[in-house]
Amino acid sequence: MPETSLPDGFVDSLSALGDRAQVLCDALLSAPSLSIRSNIRKKSPDYAGMDVDGAVPWCGEGRYLASRPSFTLDPALHQGRYYVQDASSMFLGYVVRQIIKDNPTPLLALDACAAPGGKTTALIDALPDGSVVVANEYVPKRAAVLKENIIKWGYPGVIVTRDDTSRIPRACGDFDIVVADVPCSGEGMMRKDKTAVEQWSPALVDECVARQREIVDNLWETVAPGGFFVYSTCTFNRYENELIVDHMVGDLGAESVGIPVEAAWNITSGIGTSSHCFRFLPGFTRGEGLFMAVLRKPGGYEPGRGLVAIVDKKQSVKKNSRHSSPSADEKALIPTLRMWLVGGDGYEISVTGGRINAVPKHMAALSSRLMRHLNVICHGVYVGDIKGRVAIPSQALAMSQALSAGAFPQVELSREDAVRYLRREAVSLPDGTPKGYVLVCYGSSPLGFVKNLGSRANNMYPSEWRILTQRDA
């Protein structure tokens, strides 16, 4: 990227950084970094096949890569075994672990601006087992990407919503942790996306500031007394960062929270504020940039209080139009469906229009409540569909950590066959493979389902997720 490609107004806006501004600008003209974060609840990817270039200091599951592999043709990515994420953004997991380190209780968390899902999956992995995460995204296309990534990550305790943040407080005001990686002017995207350079302007910054203030004002109501609010952007100017934090402290009554960090990480502090802030600047830290601050709502803290949702008996699940009573045939299949799940008795299973959904019992009341107030697009585990008297397993079940290992016959695929499967092409099964639904695996981890008819196997991979590129694996 030529030096003149950085907008003059942008360079001027960095004056508050002092001598650090020039280092940052020089870094933005260099090649971007590349990193991945593995899924702690699934088998790690094969790092031997990647050009690993060191660990991310603040994230035990993070690795830098010296060169970019063909992620699209790596089955492990499609299995949700890792996520391609900027190393700076991985700091969220470290922060969450710090603020809950003395409290192993399952918690209720909200990622309010969640797409495409990187911070949501980091949040999931940082929280204690049994925690519930609500992941919200307002933009429909981005919400669809979020849903796909959450399904692939496989944690059952997630509710994905597509709604404006102004509607969330009426649904729940007891989140232990609220994460808001707010829409911003995208200055941290400049060295890997020239569109971010072309779109930047002082007017865009002003527009983002107004939106950010509206979002934090909406979300502050959702934080439980004593709960935490994690504010972040991928931009560098003070207007979208420190000044928003000052607004939260001065106008909303938030308390700034300090987090211990290693000096060797080269994280810089906030500018012109007494609040604790964390700045990841290219040229100082290895990554594309991040601003983060942790705030706390005053009050007595009761961890996990939001999971003890009180549902008015007059507004039972039956009154929710999205649910209907299962037929006799559907009821007869429920014992089998429970056998498909690890700890199947710990789920509430519903069948609506033939669609089977399983929700962990400890989040069922909350899920029902959110469905009455918000646009819920995914919750718990989409187990599959019922057609006639037959239950058909879904791709979401294959990806879920709730899948019982012995529920289906399994066939291990080579990398070549795994990529062929992900393209929705035909795959061959070994002689003697039982007829019916078979779980195909790669690297000893589930990849998806096929229906073995004996003479052939029908590929059940979702057409909307299939690999379209024709490059060789």
Image (spheres, rainbow, N blue to C red):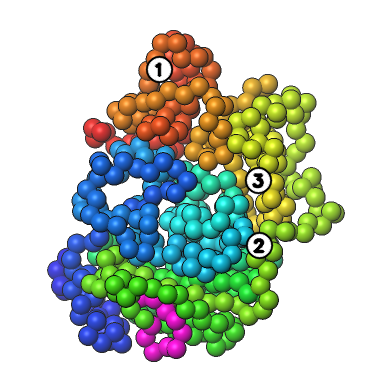
x, y percentage for residue 56? 32, 60
Q: Find residue 169 and report its horizontal and vertical position in percent.
A: 66, 68
Q: Nearer the viewer, residue 99 or 146?
A: 99
Q: Is residue 372 left or right of residue 97?
A: right
Query: Badge 1 is on which residue?
Result: 429
The mark nearer the N terminus, 1 or 3, is 3
Mark sitting earlier along the chain (1/2): 2
Task: Look at mark 3 in the image and give the residue it sits on.
Answer: 360
User: Magenta part of the protein: which range?
Assistant: 270-279
Q: Where is residue 203, by image quadrant?
A: bottom left
Which is closer to the viewer, label 2 or label 3?
A: 2
Residue 304 has which mark?
A: 2
User: Picture coordinates of residue 186 (x, y %)?
Assistant: 35, 68
Residue 144, visible in the rendered structure:
no
- The residue drawn where x is 35% and y is 29% is 418
The outermost residue toward the front is: 102
Q: Observer-nearest residue: 263 or 118?
A: 263
Real-space Cα distance between discs 1 and 3?
Answer: 34 Å
